[in-house]
Amino acid sequence: APGRGRPGGSRRGWRRRRRRRPRRGRAGRAAAAWRGGARRREAEAAMPARRGPPARRPRRALSRGARPAPPPPASRPPPPHAALPPQALTFTGKCRLRCLYGAVRLLGFAVASHQPGLPVFSPATHCALSLEALPAERPPAADLRQLRAAAPFFSLPQKKEESSFTPEDAVLASVGIVKCSSERGLLVSESMLVALEELIQACCAEDEGVPVVLVCGPKNTGKSTFNRYLINLLLNRLPSIEYMECDIGQTEFTPPGCVSLSNVTEPILGPPFTHQQMPCKMVYYGQTSCEQDTERYLDVVKYVFSSYKKEVPLVINTMGWVKGEGLLLLIDIIRLLSPSHIVQMDVYDWKAMAPLTPEYVHLSPGLYTKGKQQAKCKQVGASEVENWRSSEGEGDASAPEYKLLYVHPEFPRAGIAGEARVHSSILRDMSILGYLGQLQSPDIGAVLPLHSLVPYQVPFSAVALRVIHSDVAPTNIMYAVNASWVGLCRIPDEIKCESEGPVLLTQTPVCDCLGFGIVRGVEMERKLYHILTPVPPENLRQVNCLLLGNISIPNCILVGQQGVEGEIPYVTSDYNYSILGSGKLKKKKHFKRREYAFECDYA
């Protein structure tokens, strides 16, 4: 009834309100249970800034027909564990890498989810590769739900396990991947990052022309690793990069002893023996060092560089011979190729290699070229360059113009010759084995021995023959050619055979090399060479010259062939190296520098 504190003016109205009150009471009791029960702890974890239960809302604040606010939702499930920036996985082994979600970076190359699988090789003979997670934009909600659904199967916990062996290690080991410490990975110094950033900006700029980058430095300073990292970074923005190999001892895309120009369109994710390919231009020099014939080496470099079209950036790798005549030869190469940028690996020791500033290169004489100011100052040091510039004003306009970038490698044993992880001769043998691997079937199975493969038969009269590194009597030429590594080359001159014997060249030509092969046998009765080679038949029709150099077949090919019975020819272990004259001849490298043949044409 009215006047007794009951809402409404009649019993009927009070009953209507009484029927709605239990719903409001149940909501209040549910909220109270949430504040004081198990949901309270979850809400406090989700909202740490809120302290204590919320203030009780007065009943009069609820208007007719309004509903109380629902309790806060329970805390969301935790995000799945994954590789988040700047997390990285350093590993050794081989695999095919495909990014399922987000993006990762491997040796400078960014791998996105839309890209196909990439072959990755990280052997123990080289620096271990590191897989780094890259930050990405906010993904769609649907992708997040799919990732959370698969999280229990692909979870990588972020906390460090107490045990040295984790379930994740077992998964990686099942596919041939061994996780290792980050110290075994690539150590990128601050100077290397600065140089890479400037080179990328120069290569991607459209108004400054196509840059030519020359990388030089002593042995074992990381020149090849720097080149791979730079090429992979450039492939993130450019479709292709030109690479010129001038280091005939440690080549990147070819067997040793070659000067080549390659067009790189795929990332380099492994050592040289894992990505042997046919370059655009290649000349077989035939030796791992150019000390015996530096003049022919310069002719070969000039011949290969002439095929560069200057349409895409060019990266040039040079030898680690930077002392004595090697430094003079490097100055000649700089004047010949005219790079726009020079990256010098200096290892904080100017005694190993002088700083190749434009003024130093302009003044210093080369092995075959003269310096412009040679008559005034024959011995010009780095400290005297500034004095000369101040006295001469702006200097000669014909001085080379390039940007010099210093890179200080910070990995252990940097710049110490002979302290590499694997001897250079073993790496050369592995490159030859990688090239001969093209003879095998692409199907996974047993490796066939070379004596079970069918060779090509080449008549004596179809090809000319030349031994590069030594003078061999014509009567002994077939003994030298048999069971040897030869370059399959093409010379412009027509082969004319006037006798039944082999065609011998008197001089070593500078010509294109189309591939390599092994002379498995020489059949004197039928006048035939038996050659094993992976070169396709359409290219073999152009071969008319065989060049025999100082590159030998790896010993494992000769002694490790299965199915061979009896004594192996050309192979012996019963040899006494103590006999005078039986060992390898030692070269005298400290000869007086020869006189200059011609003056450099800077134009």
Image (spheres, rainbow, N blue to C red):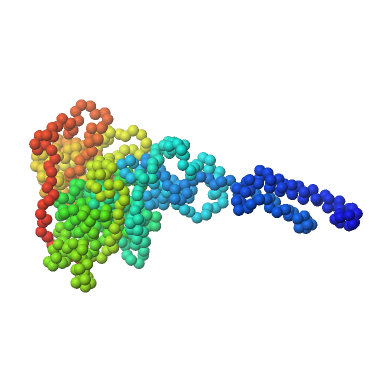
Locate the N terminus by quadrant.
bottom right
Quadrant of residue 184 within the rendered picture: top left
Residue at left 21%, top 53%? 352
Q: Residue furthest front?
A: 52
Residue 46 horizontal/vertical position (percent) = 60, 49
| Left or right of residue 195: residue 359 | left
Residue 271 horizontal/vertical position (percent) = 31, 45
| Left or right of residue 195: residue 423 | left
Closer to the camera in the image, 227 or 392: 392
Locate the C terminus by quadrant.
bottom left
Closer to the camera in the image, 462 or 63: 63
Residue at left 21%, top 69%? 389
Residue at left 77%, top 55%? 59
Closer to the camera in the image, 284 or 233: 233
Q: Residue furthest right?
A: 1
Residue at left 10%, top 43%? 472
Residue 317 seen in the current view? no
Closer to the camera in the image, 165 or 453: 165
Residue 348 seen in the current view? yes
Residue 388, compared with residue 27, is above or below; it is below
Residue 461 horizontal/vertical position (percent) = 16, 44
Q: How many marks?
A: 0
